[in-house]
Image (spheres, rainbow, N blue to C red):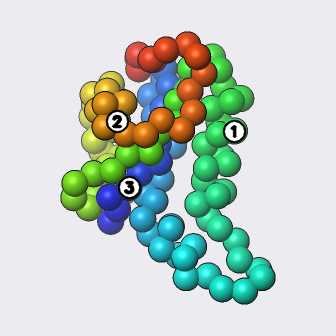
Amino acid sequence: MSNRWLVVFGSEGWEMLVPCDPIVNRDLLQFGEERKFEMDRHLTIAMLKARNNPGRRPEVWVYDTERDFSEEEMRSMWEESPQGMADLVREKGTLVFRERFGETLIR
């Protein structure tokens, strides 16, 4: 269950959806020199996807929900209405990365 989400979407729909809360909690509980921050890996992958696929006009966003959703519930919402979810995320979320081409419509 998560309230905060990282999403990568573009002209062909969503490509990556990550529930941030459980990952950040695990990252916070790590100690020692061998710490590996899982959220950093997800952010790096999201940025690489966005920068290396300009033809799909990808966008990387972080957004919060008012209630906890399971990953399955959130994936279902994105699959049922990808353009509606993208519009909602653009309205309420925080933009992490987008090339200067403006908003993308999802086919």
Q: Where is residue 97 in the image (x, y as percent from the top left)?
A: 57, 33
Q: Where is residue 103 in the image (x, y as percent from the top left)?
A: 44, 17
Crowding at mark 3 (Cα within 10 Å: few <14, some 14-19, many 20+): many
Rounded to the nearest angstrom, the CA distance separating label 1 from label 3 is 21 Å
Among the 4 quarters of the image, the one containing residue 69: bottom left
Residue at 43% x, 57% y is: 19
- In terms of secondary structure, where does tag 3 sit? strand
Rounded to the nearest angstrom, the CA distance separating label 2 from label 1 is 20 Å
Checking the image for residue 70, the label placed there is none
Q: Which residue lies furthest to the top in this view?
A: 101
Crowding at mark 1 (Cα within 10 Å: few <14, some 14-19, many 20+): few
Q: Name the residue under label 3.
A: 4
Residue at 78% x, 82% y is: 33
- In terms of secondary structure, where does tag 2 sit? helix
Chain-order first, disc 1 or disc 3: 3
Q: Hey, what amino acid is under mark 3? A: Arg
Chain-order first, disc 3 or disc 2: 3
Can residue 85 be seen here? The reply is no
Q: Is residue 85 above or below residue 35?
A: above
Look at the numbered discs 2 and 1 and tell me whether their residues touch, using CB distance below 8 Å.
Answer: no
Q: Which of 46 and 96 is in front in this view?
A: 96
Q: Is residue 3 above or below residue 24?
A: above
Q: Where is residue 41 in the image (x, y as percent from the top left)?
A: 66, 57
Checking the image for residue 89, the label placed there is 2
Q: Hey, what amino acid is under mark 1? A: Leu
Q: Where is residue 52 in the image (x, y as percent from the top left)?
A: 71, 29
